[in-house]
Amino acid sequence: MATCDSAVVVIPAHDEALKLPRCLRSVVTAAACAPVPVLTVVVLDSCTDESASLAGRFGDDVHFVEVDVRNVGASRAAGFAYARKTCGVDDSRVWYATTDADSQVDPDWLARQMGAEADMVLGVVRVTNWRQHSAVAVRRYLAAYRAKLRRSGGGHDHVHGANMGFRADVYWETGGFAALESDEDVDLVHRFERAGRRIHRDVGLSVVTSARRDGRAPRGFANHLKTMSRHDGAA
């Protein structure tokens, strides 16, 4: 397995001017802690807020591109396509990672992914602000989430577009992100699995994500949290 000598982080964003700065600060920190140069691509998808005004505030290695598709799968795909064209390097030596604009990664996020010696690395998420949800809904969510953690071998059964990375060459070989409004991350994982690629599921690789009630993807994390509230009168 070839050693990667550069990395790309893609962040899709739709009207995330309030949350995006915190996300970018965390990604810039993770890039500084990574063992290789890192290009970050923010994909502004059909934004009507002030997200575009953030361009240029986080250094030369953070690029902003704009699309008008209202589709998270297509946005992620556009980000990696832009990076591939911009970098012009051997795909076999590039590590790709993606997170979401309402999330914050840890400083070792990229370094840990790249050190796993896998074709794909899947992490987990944690929520630090539950103010928009009832205690009953939070307990229900946490119980269900923990039930999918495999205690043996440090693995888990979760897939989060907010916390995943993969080899660039395998990403392109398997067709990349599909133009799906939801579950684009699950779809990509299934194709890596069908191709027999090595997938490392790391329960210790965690990012902070938002527990907001109104999400961007129709069947995304926010919608999942709503299902936790439907039986206690909170939704």
Image (cartoon, rainbow, N blue to C red):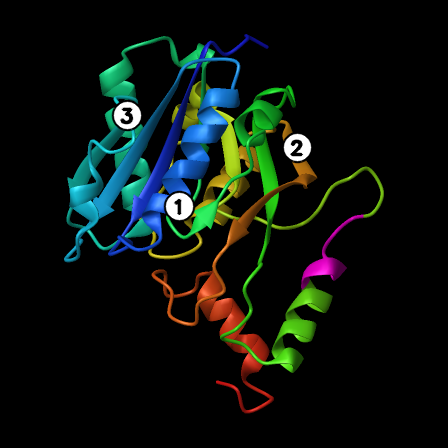
Report helix, strand or loop for mark 2: strand
What amino acid is labelled 3 in the image? Gly
Residue 35 horizontal side relative to residue 82, left or right: right
Report helix, strand or loop for mark 1: helix
Neighbourhood count class around disc 1 (C-alpha, 10 Å): few under 14, some 14–19, many 20 upward: some
| Mark 1 touches mark 2? (CB < 8 Å) | no
Q: Which residue is drawn at 52% across and 86% down?
A: 234
Q: Please give the residue where the numbered disc 1 appears in the rendered image.
A: 22
Dot placed on the residue nearer the N-terminal end, 1 or 3? 1
Q: Residue at x 62, y 26 (%)?
A: 112
Q: Does the magenta stretch include residue 151?
A: no
Mark 1 and mark 2: Cα distance apart in space: 27 Å
Quadrant for the N terminus, please: top right
Which is more foreground, mark 1 or mark 2?
1
Point out which mark residue 35 bears. none
Q: Is residue 153 above or below residue 94?
A: below
Indicate the position of residue 58 as horizontal and vertical percent values: 29, 31
Indicate the position of residue 206 as horizontal and vertical percent values: 61, 43
Which is more foreground, mark 2 or mark 3?
3
Q: Is residue 190 visible?
A: yes
Q: Please give the residue where the numbered disc 3 appears in the rendered image.
A: 59
The magenta-colored residue range is: 145-150
Q: Can residue 98 be seen in this view?
A: no
Q: Residue at x 43, y 64 (%)?
A: 219
Residue 145 image-quadrant placement: bottom right
Neighbourhood count class around disc 2 (C-alpha, 10 Å): few under 14, some 14–19, many 20 upward: many
